[in-house]
Image: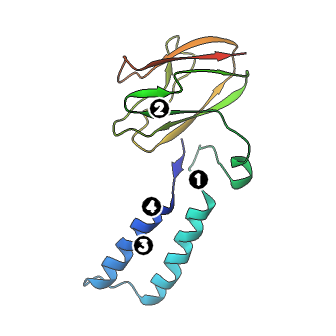
Amino acid sequence: MSIHIGAADTSRIAVWAWEHQMTNRRIPTAALVLLVPVLAAIAAMGTRAVKGASTTTAAAASTRVPSVTIKNFAFRPAKLTVAKGTRLQVTNADAAAHTFSARNNSFSSPVLDPGRSATITLGKSGTFAFYCKIHANMTGTVVVK
């Protein structure tokens, strides 16, 4: 699973730091001067790795990584074809938690809260129906060659 920290997140953190500077819980000005550039650097790096997570760097971002996005209670794309051994990135861009699971239990993501991602390695050839274990009407198919 990956946690994405983007410009919007760093802006929220910077606003939080500024608000706390203005209240009784003062953050030293020196800390603010250091905090804002560090947050900007994190946003510029893209995706940050978490224990057990896959890492996406600027170099890796230049190569196309197959992905499925969950949005509006649907998988996008709902049908895809990939090579055996493909690492498929699944991102929940919805307001509700979802999973990405094979009907035959050959693969399954953990529960993906909104904004979270997981990487699924598709190691067996075949056609696999997938669905969300929380919302069983959400379905799709992946062909692994």
Query: What kind of residue is marked 2?
Result: Pro
Which of marks 2 and 4 precedes in the sequence?
Answer: 4
User: Where residue 11 sits in the image (x, y, percent)?
Assistant: 43, 68
**In the image, which is nearer the foreground, mark 2 or mark 3?**
3
Which of marks 2 and 1 precedes in the sequence?
Answer: 1
Q: Is residue 1 left or right of residue 97?
A: right
User: Do the CB atoms of the residues marked 4 and 2 lie less than 8 Å apart?
Assistant: no
Which of marks 3 and 1 precedes in the sequence?
Answer: 3
**In the image, which is nearer the foreground, mark 1 or mark 2?**
1
The residue that disc 4 covers is: 9
- Residue at the spot x=38%, y=76% of the render? 17
The secondary structure type at the circle numbered 4 is: helix
What colouring method underlies this structural image? rainbow
Query: What kind of residue is marked 4?
Result: Asp
Q: CA distance from mark 2 to mark 3?
A: 31 Å
**In the image, which is nearer the foreground, mark 4 or mark 2?**
4
Assign the N terminus to one quadrant of the image.
top right
- Residue at the spot x=63%, y=43% of the render? 54
User: Where residue 120 sits in the image (x, y, percent)?
Assistant: 60, 30
User: Where residue 61 sits in the image (x, y, percent)?
Assistant: 69, 48
The residue that disc 1 covers is: 47
Q: CA distance from mark 4 to mark 1?
A: 12 Å
- Residue at the spot x=48%, y=88% of the render? 30
Which of marks 3 and 2 precedes in the sequence?
Answer: 3
The residue that disc 3 covers is: 14
User: Do the CB atoms of the residues marked 3 and 4 lie less than 8 Å apart?
Assistant: no
User: Where residue 71 sits in the image (x, y, percent)?
Assistant: 42, 34
Query: What kind of residue is marked 3?
Result: Ala
Query: What kind of residue is marked 1?
Result: Thr
User: Do the CB atoms of the residues marked 4 and 1 lie less than 8 Å apart?
Assistant: no
The residue that disc 2 covers is: 110
- Density class for disc 1 (Cα within 10 Å; few <14, some 14-19, many ≥20) is some
